[in-house]
């Protein structure tokens, strides 16, 4: 895949996820909303594009994300060295939700800066 070429990774009525090749691994951009209705499908799509590499996920285009969606992206159940998703462009709402869930220290230490 060409570095600048984006392809559709996942889409439903609420969410569009595109992916492009990047030096650090697949780069995914999310636009729309992630909630309990689509978080599992997003997890499957992200796992499918990882191919054993780190995946950078840009969340700046999300207008809403609930705890089920944030759990997919933050991977709080995995030790830090096993987390393969790195977040970029977290919004203040997303950071607040991370803090409320007690995942803010993990996310700051193991995710790309905003």
Image (spheres, grey):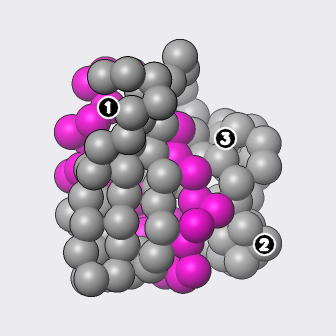
Q: Earlier in the sequence, mark 1 or mark 2?
A: 1
Q: Is residue 67 magenta?
A: yes
Residue lying at the far top in this picture: please name it.
23
Which numbered disc, 1 or 3, marks the residue closer to the eye? 1
Relative image position of residue 65 (x, y in whole percent)? 51, 77
Residue at figure coordinates x 78%, y 42% from the top left? 113
Residue at figure coordinates x 54%, y 20% from the top left? 24
Q: Which residue is mark 2?
A: 92
| Relative depth, front residue between 6 and 50 | 6
Task: Write down the region rendered in magenta.
Answer: 43-72
Estimate the spatial distance between the alpha carbons at disc 1 and disc 3, rounded to whole Å: 16 Å
Whether residue 93 is situated above or below residue 56 in the rendered picture: below
Q: Earlier in the sequence, mark 2 or mark 3?
A: 2
Residue at figure coordinates x 58%, y 67% from the top left? 61
Q: In the shown orientation, is residue 68 left or right of residue 23? A: left
Whether residue 19 is situated above or below residue 66 in the rendered picture: above
């Amino acid at each position: 895949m060409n570095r600048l070429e984006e392809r559709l990774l996942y889409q439903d009525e609420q969410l569009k996820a595109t992916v492009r090749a990047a030096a650090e691994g697949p780069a995914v951009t999310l636009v729309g909303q992630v909630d309990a209705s689509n978080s599992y499908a997003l997890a499957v799509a992200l796992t499918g594009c990882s191919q054993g590499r780190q995946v950078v996920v840009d969340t700046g285009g999300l207008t809403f994300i609930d705890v089920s969606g944030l759990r997919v992206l933050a991977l709080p159940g995995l030790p830090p060295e096993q987390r393969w998703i790195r977040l970029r462009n977290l919004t203040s709402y997303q950071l607040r939700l991370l803090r409320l869930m007690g995942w803010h220290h993990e996310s700051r230490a193991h995710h790309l800066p905003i």
